[in-house]
Amino acid sequence: MIALMIAPAPQTAGRPAPGIESAAGSIRVLLQRADPGSRVELLSSRPTHAVGCFEGRSAVQAVAGLPRLFGVCVRAHQAAAAAALGIASPAGRAELRAENLREHLLRVYLDWPLLLGRNPQASLPTGLLQACADLDADPAAARRLVEEHTLGMATQAFLDLPDTAALLRWARAHAAQRPAAAMLLHVARQPALLPLAEVAPLGVIDLPRAAQRLDAARADDFVRQPEIDGACRQTGAWARQCGAPLLADLQARGRPLLARYAARLRELAQAIEGGPDARDDPWYGLLRSAPGIACVETSRGSLLHRIAMAPDGSVARWRAVAPTEWNFHPRGAAATLLQAIPAPLPTSRRAELARLAVHAADPCVSSQCVVDEGEAGGAGAPRGGKA
C-alpha cells in the first residue's frame, strides 16, 4: 500500500472570528486494482455548509467575514456573495482576473515542481510572489511573467499551438529551463490511461433553476454532490478550454491527463492575451447573478452562492457549491480519470498516475491518495516491478 499527500492544505487568511472556523477539510482517495482499470473511492471531509456560520449576521458582516473562512479564491467568494446579496462587491472583474491568474501561477511554480520531485525554490522567478500580489496593478509585469518566465514564447503563439505534436515540441524545447514545460513532458511520458467517457462540461449554470435546487428539501444533497438532470458535470480549466483544437486533438489521441495540464497553461495565456476588455471571455472573472444567487468563474471552476435574507435584514439561509464538489463527485471527473488507471501497471506507476490525476482535477483542499496493491474485493494482485 502506498499513501501519497497530493498537496498541502491552503492557509486561511487571518484568524477566524468567534463562531467562524476555517472551511478546509481534505479529500482522501482510495485506489484498488479492478481489472482492467481501478476501483475508486473518494472520501471528503470538506465542511460544505461552512457558510452557514454567517446565518443571522448582516449582509455586510457576512461578506467581510469570508476571508477568515476561505483560504483560496477569497475575492471570488466575496464577489459572488455580494452579488447574491445585491450589495457592492469588494472585488471587481480586474481583481477576480488577477486572483485566477495568481492561482494558476502558484500551481505552476509551487505545486508542479513538487510533482516533479524538485525544490520549488529552485525555479521561482525573482519576485514571483510580489508580482502575483500586484497582477491587477501591473499588467505589463504579468505579461512578462507568463511570456518570458512561464512559457518562453508569446501568449498568442502558445494559444495558436494546433495539436499534440506542436505542444510536445514546445515542451521539449523548454523543459530544461521552465517547470511548466517540464511538467507537460513528464505527464506526456506516463503510461496511457484506459479509454474513458469524459464527464460533460458544466457550461453556464441556469441560476434560477440552481436557486430552486438549493431551496428544495434535499438541497444538502446538491451541495455535497451536485448533478444536473441526474448526471455529473465537470468545471474548471479543461471544461472551459476543451473546445480548443489543441485540447480536442489531445482528447482524440487518448491523452486526457495531458489535456488538463495544457488547459491550465492555455488559461494563463488567454488571460494575458485577452486584456481587460475581453468581456466575452468566460474565464475572465465572469460574474453572473440573479436575485439571491450568483456564480463566478474561478481558476478551479464555477463557484455558486445562494443566499436568502430574513425580514430583519439578516442572513436567513446560505448555501455555496464549490468547484471541488463537482469535480470530486463520486462519478465526476476525478473519479473517471482514476478509474482509467490500468490495473496491470506496477504499483509505483499507478501511484504516480493517481497523484497526477488528482492534481489535474485541482481540489481546493489538501488531498491524500492511498494506492492499494490488492484487487477490489480482496483478491491479491501480482506486485509490479520498478518502472
Image: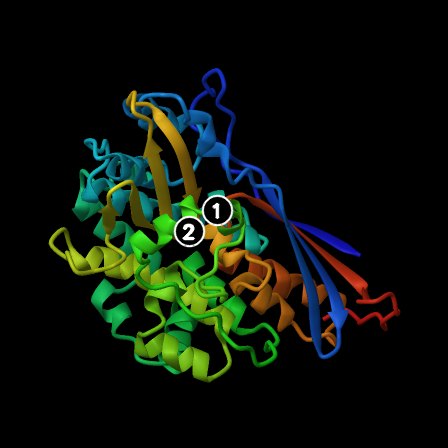
Q: Is residue 30 above or below residue 77?
A: below
> Does dot 1 land on a helix, a strand or a loop?
helix
Identity of the amino acid at label 2? Arg
**Callout 2: few (<14), some (14-19), or many (20+) C-alpha neighbours within 10 Å?**
some
Which residue has dot 2 on it? 213
Q: Identify residue for label 1.
A: 219
Vertically, is 60 above or below 127? above
Q: Is residue 344 left or right of residue 121?
A: right
Q: Is residue 106 above or below residue 342?
A: above
Q: Nearer the viewer, residue 228 or 299?
A: 228
Query: Relative to 376, is 369 above or below?
Result: above
Residue 335: name its quadrant.
bottom right
Left or right: where does residue 82 sit relative to residue 362?
left
Image label count: 2
Question: Which residue is situated farthest in the left direction here?
Answer: 277
What x and y, as percent, mark residue 211? Answer: 35, 48
Residue at point 48% right, 62% down? 183
Specify the quadrant of the image occupied by residue 133. Answer: top left
Q: Where residue 136 sits in the image (x, y, percent)?
A: 21, 40
Give the amino acid at mark 1.
Ala
Q: Quick check: can you spot residue 299? A: no
Query: Between disc 2 and disc 1, whose residue precedes?
Result: 2
CA gap between label 2 and label 1 equals 6 Å
- The image shows residue 256 at horizontal and vertical percentages of 49, 73
Residue 7 screen position, x and y as percent: 56, 46
Q: Name the one closer to the observer, 334 or 264.
A: 334
Label 2 sits on a secondary structure element that is helix
Q: At 36% from the left edge and 41% from the top edge, which residue is drawn?
A: 306
Q: Residue at x 40, y 67 (%)?
A: 201
The answer to which of 172 and 234 lies nearer the viewer is: 234
Task: Quarter of the image for the C terminus: give it.
Answer: bottom right
The answer to whether the residue labelled 2 contacts the one labelled 1, judged by CB atoms less than 8 Å apart, is yes
